[in-house]
Image (cartoon, rainbow, N blue to C red):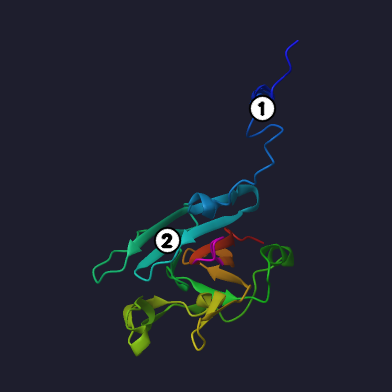
Amino acid sequence: MKPVTLFTQLIMLGVILLSFPACNGILGNIYDEPFAEEKNEFGFIETDKANNSGTVYIDATSYTRWTYIDFHALIVDSLKITEDMREPENWDIAVHRYDAKTNGASVLETGFTGLSTLKTSGEIPKGDYISDEWTTNKIVVDMSGMMDGKLKYAESYYNRELSKWLFVDTSTMPPAYNPSNKVYVIKLKDNTVAAVRLRNFMDTSGIKGYMTIDYIYPFKI
């Protein structure tokens, strides 16, 4: 009998390995499944209809775009900021970088740091719900003159309460990013209620502006 060479052994090993399912079989757990941001998936990436909850993942890296989130239809849209821009017909909240505004809603920052604890509280939090206000010096659309202290702003509505979900301290270099980790309750204009929490503000490689938002909608007692 001829001796089995190393080359023959390697071929036989390869045949054995290929005989196993690569994804769902014995080798399926060798490599972790990539996160949504690693696969460049955006929008409503998770939905749990039984609990009226889910996760939205958006690309808010641009200073020249608004990203519109519609909790009713589970749709995300993005539009470039121009003087004659027309917003989507239906949307609930919108995000520019970390700035936020609503479509005729009002917002309360709660003391809860998790959506599950809000849900088990058994009530819609009471407090001073804040509506949007018109601003001319919040929505930065051009950072090219930052070193000279000259920024270009777009006029827009802005919700200062929901925008608390991430504080960017520009008094230091590089800027410090401080998420509130709080849950925000949003009373929408149709009298339904949403609850959101900013889980993350960057992707797995550390690029800021990729936002992961957990939500409950509709939030019912």
Q: Which residues are magenta?
A: 201-207
Q: Residue at x 58, y 61 (%)?
A: 215
Q: Earlier in the sequence, mark 2 or mark 1?
A: 1
Q: Secondary structure beneath disc 2?
A: loop
Q: Main secondary structure of the magenta part?
A: loop
Q: Which residue is mark 2?
A: 91
Residue at the spot x=32%, y=87% of the render? Answer: 150
- Disc 2 to disc 1: CB gap under 8 Å: no
The magenta stretch spans residue 204: yes
Foreground residue, 125 or 16?
16
Question: Residue 63 vs residue 11: left or right?
Answer: left
73 vs 179: above or below: above
Picture quarter containing residue 120? Answer: bottom right
Residue 82 in percent (x, y) is at 27, 69
Q: Quadrant of the C terminus?
A: bottom right
Q: Position of residue 89 (x, y in %)?
A: 35, 59
Which class describes the residues within 10 Å of circle 2: few (<14), some (14-19), or many (20+)?
Answer: many
Of the pair 62 and 49, the residue shown nearer to us = 62
Amino acid marked by disc 2: Trp
Number of marks: 2
Where is residue 190? Give x, y as percent. 48, 63
Provide residue 30's location: percent of width, then percent of height. 68, 42
Q: Which mark is residue 10?
A: 1
Residue 192 visible, this angle: no
